Image: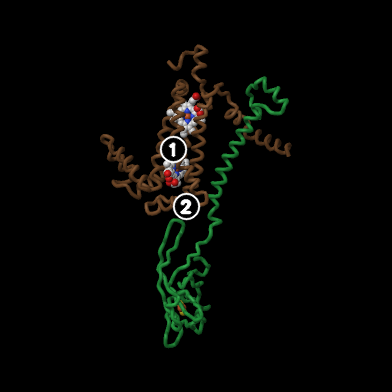
Amino acid sequence: MTTGLGRCPCESEAEEQGVTRRGFLAGAAALLAGTIASVLGAAGLSYFVSPAFEKEDENWIDVGRASELRTGAPVKVDYVARKRDAWVVTEKRSSVWLSNLGGGRFIAFDPRCTHLGCPYRWDQGKQEFLCPCHAGVFDREGKVLSGPPPRPLDRFPVKVVSGRLLIRPVDEKGAA
Amino acid sequence: MKRRCRAVGEWLRRRTGCDRVWETLFARHIPEAEGPTAWLYTLGSATLFIFVVQAVTGALLAMNYVPSPDHAYDSVRFINEKVLCGSFIHGLHHFGASFMVVLVVLHMLRVYFMGAYKYPREGTWMVGVVLLLVVIGFGFTGYLLPWDQKAYWATMVGTNIAGQTPFVGPLVSKILKGGGEMGASTLTRFYALHVLVLPAVVLLLIGIHLFLVVWHGISEPPERARRRGEGNPLG
Ligand code: HEM
Ligand code: HEM
Ligand code: FES
């Protein structure tokens, strides 16, 4: 852009050597502005897009000592899940059916029936899970024995860490 | 490539007159000041720059900030501890706020001591006075937002001072606080003022202020006027 402002006569000499005072200052100003803009821009952009690179919170929940869970009848365990959502911590009461198959193998069942979500119970005499709503029946590994449930009982991931039994309750979509 | 660029520039110029706009705004004649005096003329632009930084960082902060007593403090902590670059962005806004007040006052002092508020620039000055109040308003309303002890008690003091005004004091204080006691509605009120009302007002005023600055041109330093025998502005 031409500026229309008068130029210092001394500039024409320097211009022949390639660097003018005006050109140098314009360059220096552009460099400074560029530095400031890129530092601010980079920080601002990282701030803005950082949610895309966040690690999912694994959210394992401690449901007791593994050794206290005896083989045999599955037991229903109530727990309180503390869930962090950014700056909000919510507590949700929930429960899980735990089954010790022996040999360090554990199963954690989602306590909702796979038909329409009713809470089922364990029938000790029949050694089966019974759902009261529409008479769904599952065996101790969660397989459907009869009734309308379309698939076996859902399971949560389980692991044992230094003697404690940890579960990770996930819904159908896999979100914790 | 270069020809292509020039063609696009020409196309724009014919339709928008952007070259005239550029010339009016940036190729104006400005006073031939030198040395420290010349630097004083940068204070207004510096204020403008910090305002832009505040607006950018403020918009980013607003993405994670919650103006509610049960989450405000935690959300600011979340920004500082969990968000990438969060403490940097918050820091810029925090220190920028103080810096902007300092700069605007320095800018006002330079205008005052150079007598730049005189005819025909009284309008620029008057808009400036309102700008000063709005900037202080930004600082006052923003200070409450982190909702920590400092924020809470500073605002308690501030609203109580307003409450000391003869006759209307208690009313003003109640309106500021959104009720008799400081609480949730104080926070939402200050938040709305800080991020909605004041930015709209300040943008309008800065627009008028800068229009007037360009319209009148920037005043010469007083020494030169004196040398020319146009009267002695320093009295
Ligand atoms: C957000 C706040 C403000 C911004 C962004 C701003 C911006 C500017 C800019 C960029 C200029 C050009 C010349 C210079 O920088 O010195 C200017 C001039 C001026 N400002 Fe401000 N200003 C602000 C607040 C104020 C305040 C608080 C006052 C006085 C109460 C004021 C009074 C003036 C006057 C009278 C001029 C004309 C000076 C001259 O022609 O030499 N401004 N302002
Ligand atoms: C124009 C757009 C602006 C927006 C959208 C904005 C937004 C925000 C938000 C969301 C907060 C709360 C987060 C926090 O406390 O860190 C905040 C805090 C604050 N703002 Fe702004 N702001 C703006 C401009 C300004 C300006 C111009 C000033 C000062 C003159 C200012 C001064 C403050 C202060 C002092 C705080 C408290 C910061 C702290 O120490 O935590 N803000 N702002
Ligand atoms: S909900 Fe369990 S059988 Fe229908």
Left or right, A38 with respect to B138, comes to: right
Tell me the quarter of the picture where residue B17 sits.
top right
Residues at circles 1 and 2 in contact by the CB criterion of under 8 Å: no
Which mark, residue B113?
A: none
Determine the colour of chain B.
brown
The residue furthest top is: B229
Q: From this view, report whether residue B210 is shown above or below residue B226.
A: below
Q: Secondary structure at mark 2?
A: helix
- The Cα–Cα distance between marks 1 and 2, rounded to whole angstroms, is 23 Å
Q: Position of residue A145 (x, y in %)?
A: 51, 84
Residue matched to label 2: B81
Q: Residue at x 56, y 21 (%)?
A: B32
Quarter that holds the N terminus of chain B? top right
Question: Ligand 2 near label 1 (Cβ, under 8 Å)?
Answer: yes
- The amino acid beneath tag 2 is Glu
Within 10 Å of disc 2 (Cα), the crowding (few <14, some 14-19, many 20+) is: few
Tell me the quarter of the picture where residue B123 sits.
top left
- The amino acid beneath tag 1 is Ser
Residue matched to label 1: B98
Q: Position of residue A84 (x, y in %)?
A: 45, 60
